[in-house]
Amino acid sequence: MGTMELSKFKDCLASGSLTRRQINKVLASVGLVTVSMPVVRNAAQAASTIQVFTWSGYDVPEMHSAYLETYGGSPEFLFYADNDEAIEKVRAGYLPTLVQPTSYMIGRWRDAGLLSPIDTSRLSNYPEVFQQLKDINAMHHDGQVYGLPLAWGNSSVLFRKDLAPEYVDNPTWEILWDPNYAGRLAQRDSMDAGVLEAALILGIEDPYNMSDADLERVREKLVEQRPLLRYYWNSQADIEQALASGEIVAAYAWNDAYASLKREGLDVGYMIPKEGILTWVDTTCLIKDGPGDEVEAYDFMNSLISPETGVFLIEEYGYGSANAQSFPMANQDLLTELGIEDPDKVLALGEFFNEWNPEVREKANIMFEEVKAGF
């Protein structure tokens, strides 16, 4: 299994000690995308009345230390590795208390009648949550809050500053279209990645609801890029290795890859492109008619957005915290390495992943696959 032995992977998977990005790296290396993970129980969970459906890594005690102090144990957890897997499992009958989807999925959960609104007045840490995250359209509907921001991160350009010095002070997605680096560029094998990058460069105001004419403009941009790429990547670990060796100069990547290469002493940069940086946000949602005590569920949610939980997210996972007070408490050198030392600036420039118009998404998926195939 590449850099991780099978036995070690199984042990880490069972213990819940891997983050979702680590899981996806390993799975991608063997051609897999998602994995269903079993319910994890231990003696300390026995007294809990709530169940949490989440990504692996969000279950560790450091994520809910205040809840532990009150209740003496952790909730029951069930894990998923894909947003679509999560909603389909609940639609099929699994009923947790809380679920933690990425923000662009909240509308699908709500429209399916699976969510209850969240009373934020019952969350003492909520006033410290970044306003930019609270204002994401998916978080609220008809004056009610349905999503509680938890963690966030970016998708942008990771590049070798020593090999492409002209881009050090010129942050732009256009580097991934630069013919000077033909054969030394890499794109993520994801419609969302390629199509959204092209739409940002083209200045398309709402890529999630593009017209056919706009989709054709995006197609032309992606066709222009294809012969310049060394490959479309599935495993970010491969990108880190290729950048380290100099095989590639620039690629679509996430914050944690930047931090990893910086720790190796490589002269890499992580852009805040002038066209906008893509930002994902993981959230917590309250399941309608879910099991367990409501007070306990709110105590757990409040613990998730505490400053202390935020410091753990930053320092252990390289994610941004939803709580603004976490940043002055965290390792300042690490914040700089991650490119989030000024979170207000990063969030202000962020283009948050949003929910696609289903018809547009279908057309964009077909188009992206055709471009990759050379049609």
Image (spheres, rainbow, N blue to C red):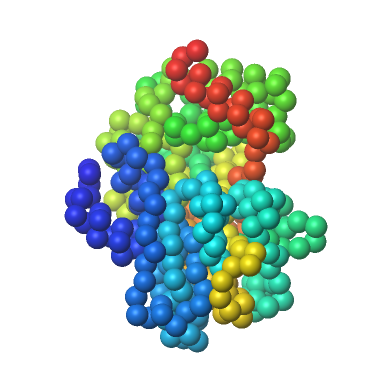
- In this rendering, position of residue 95 left or right of residue 61: right
Percent coordinates x, y for residue 223 in the rendering: 52, 17
Q: Nearer the viewer, residue 225 or 342?
A: 225
- In this rendering, position of residue 76 left or right of residue 133: left
Percent coordinates x, y for residue 113 in the rendering: 68, 55
Q: Is residue 162 visible?
A: no
Residue at x 64%, y 57% (from the top left corner): 114
Residue found at the very far top of the displayed protein = 375
Percent coordinates x, y for residue 137 in the rendering: 71, 52
Instruction: Judge whether 321 appears above or below 230 on screen.
Output: below
Residue at x 41%, y 74% (from the top left corner): 61
Quadrant placement of the N terminus: top left
Residue found at the very far right of the displayed protein = 142
Q: Is residue 67 visible?
A: yes
Q: Nearer the viewer, residue 25 or 351?
A: 25
Residue at x 34%, y 58% (from the top left corner): 18
Residue found at the very far front of the displayed protein = 93
Residue at x 35%, y 80% (from the top left corner): 43
Instruction: Judge whether 248 appears above or below 313 on screen.
Output: above
Percent coordinates x, y for residue 8 in the rendering: 21, 56
Q: Nearer the viewer, residue 168 or 346?
A: 346
Instruction: Judge whether 27 appears above or below 318 on screen.
Output: above
Instruction: Judge whether 173 appears above or below 95 on screen.
Output: above
Numbered-mark total = 0
> Residue 297 is drawn in which quadrant?
bottom right
- In this rendering, position of residue 205 left or right of residue 257: right
